[in-house]
Image (cartoon, rainbow, N blue to C red):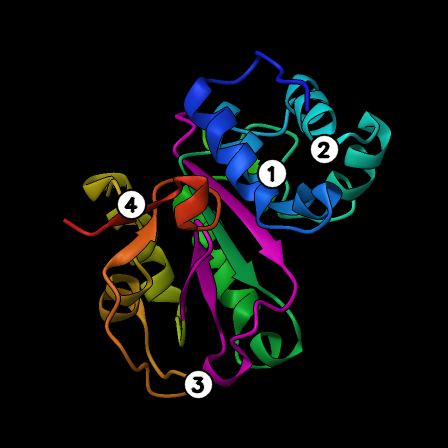
Amino acid sequence: MTAPHRWSEETLARARDLIARYPERRSALMPLLYLAMAEEGHLTEAGMETVAELLGITPAQVLSVASFYTMYKREPVGRYLISCCTSISCHLLGSDELLAAIEDEAGVPAGETDPDRLITVESVECIGACGGAPAVQVNYETVEGVDPEAGRELVRWLRKARPEVIVADELQTLFGGRTGFDWAIPDDEGAVGPYPAFGPLGTAGRES
């Protein structure tokens, strides 16, 4: 395998470790796209070319996946990505009002980032938390049963506290309400940026 030199050696080592987990190299495409985001902040053309080179596929094949799934960001986002679910269960339980409160407090409409590049707000389809609707994610860490005032408090907290790690358990304690089920094992590990927390990607950290 050729070794592109656009990424740090640490990131290239993570990429090779991820590729080795799959019987076919190209099957590592989706996790490598997250790795590219973590390396450069978002998916750049150069980053997608690096993924293509590592996997032995074309940049067009990489782009076809990156452009299909909304969680792959091809434009810069803020340090905190707030994703408000507006699918049917959340919609019926007030997610439109929740999203409006988050947009108002953040000062930007869904799909945009504040001038400080701290917070990006987006409206998303089902995030698998229908039983605890309405649900929100911050850097893909989920909090359930969020009402509009709690949504505002969440934005204010992110601006004031600026946590290094976003942890679902902490979000639920601070801003959540009814959950879909009782959360089992406490977890103090979460996301260090606007991408899913996953150890092999180097995107997971522990709450201090």
Identify which residue is drawn at 66% across, 22% down: 50
Label 4 – label 1 distance at C-alpha? 28 Å
Earlier in the chain: of badge 4 and badge 3, it is 4
Identify which residue is drawn at 66% across, 77% down: 88
Identify which residue is drawn at 62% across, 38% down: 33
Task: Characterize the local packing of mark 1: few (<14), some (14-19) or many (20 or more) Cα atoms within 10 angstroms.
Answer: many
> SS of the residue at dot 3?
loop
Earlier in the chain: of badge 2 and badge 3, it is 2
Q: Nearer the viewer, mark 4 or mark 1?
A: 1
Task: Characterize the local packing of mark 4: few (<14), some (14-19) or many (20 or more) Cα atoms within 10 angstroms.
Answer: some
Q: Are marks 1 and 2 in contact (CB under 8 Å)?
A: yes
Task: Characterize the local packing of mark 3: few (<14), some (14-19) or many (20 or more) Cα atoms within 10 angstroms.
Answer: some
Is 129 placed above or below 178 here?
A: above
User: In this figure, which residue is indicated by the disc labeled 2?
Assistant: 55
Label 4 – label 3 distance at C-alpha? 25 Å
Q: Are marks 4 and 3 in contact (CB under 8 Å)?
A: no
Q: Is residue 154 left or right of residue 14?
A: left
Quadrant assignment, res 56: top right
What mark, if any, has residue 158 been given in the picture?
Answer: 4
Query: Disc 3 marks which amino acid?
Result: Gly
Query: Disc 2 marks which amino acid?
Result: Leu
Q: Where does the image place residue 138, in percent across and percent down from the top left?
A: 41, 53
Task: Characterize the local packing of mark 2: few (<14), some (14-19) or many (20 or more) Cα atoms within 10 angstroms.
Answer: many
Magenta segment boundaries in residue numbering:
115-143
